[in-house]
Amino acid sequence: MTDNKSADAVKAERHKARQQRIKEGVDAKIARAQEEKGILLVLTGNGKGKSTSGFGTVVRAVGHGKKAAVVQFIKGNWDCGERTLLEGAGVEFHVMGTGFTWETQDREKDTAAAVKAWEATEKLLQDDSIDLVMLDELTYMVSYHYLEVDRVIEALKNRPPMQHVIVTGRACHRAIVELADTVSEVQVVKHAFEAGVKAQPGFDY
């Protein structure tokens, strides 16, 4: 019994020492991270949940009394639960509104809609009263060459210094990734849609 107690005590001390080292490492990182600036966050990858994650951050900002705005690229005019909720909380929305390019099959129309949405974006990225701007599915606009990446980069670089920006979408252009402060890649392991489960309101949109 005594030996068992001694072994347990040794394990407990080792665990405490490991946790203490972890705490010291975290504390050191916190101590070094003293700069305050607007963060450019990219949420990319083929997995589900990029927009959902971005909207969660918008909700967080609003909860802290911050002013936020959202531009939705490639979204149609169908119901969007996040938009319904956040517009009611004073979040400004701009919706490209033409749907997915494989639905319209009209490059000229899609390009014009993308440029119009980007013009609204540029105004938001020049407004220092807006704390957070979410650019939902922006990556596709660059991938499809509806928007010039240099124009996008210039606006992101020249935004107000304390303004946060979230960019979502698959296959984010490397220039945006390089400019970003934080990049998270969401990978798909399984997806219900591929098994024939339809998208459902309140969960998928």
Image (cartoon, rainbow, N blue to C red):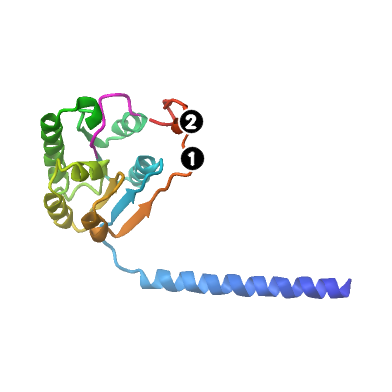
Q: Is residue 112 left or right of residue 190?
A: left
The disc, 1 or 2, on the residue closer to the chain's N-terminal end is 1
Mark 2 residue type: Ala
Residue nearest the viewer, comparing 71 with 131: 71
> Which contiguous range is marked in magenta?
71-80
Above or below 154: residue 90: above
Q: What residue lies at 29% left-to-right and 32% top-to-bottom?
A: 87
Q: What residue lies at 82% left-to-right and 72% top-to-bottom?
A: 5
Do the CB atoms of the residues marked 1 and 2 lie less than 8 Å apart?
yes
User: Is 108 in the magenta?
Assistant: no
Q: Is residue 184 left or right of residue 19?
A: left
Secondary structure of residue under mark 2: helix
Helix, strand or loop for the magenta stretch, by majority = loop
Above or below 93: residue 77: above
Q: Is residue 179 left or right of residue 89?
A: left
Q: What residue lies at 59% left-to-right and 70% top-to-bottom?
A: 19
Residue 47's image quarter? top left
Q: What residue lies at 13% left-to-right and 35% top-to-bottom?
A: 111
Give x and y (percent) for residue 24. 51, 74
Residue 84's image quarter? top left
Give x and y (percent) for residue 121. 16, 42
Give x and y (percent) for residue 102. 24, 29
- Image quadrant in which the N terminus is located: bottom right
Secondary structure of residue under mark 1: loop
Determine which residue is flagged by label 1: 190
Determine which residue is flagged by label 2: 195
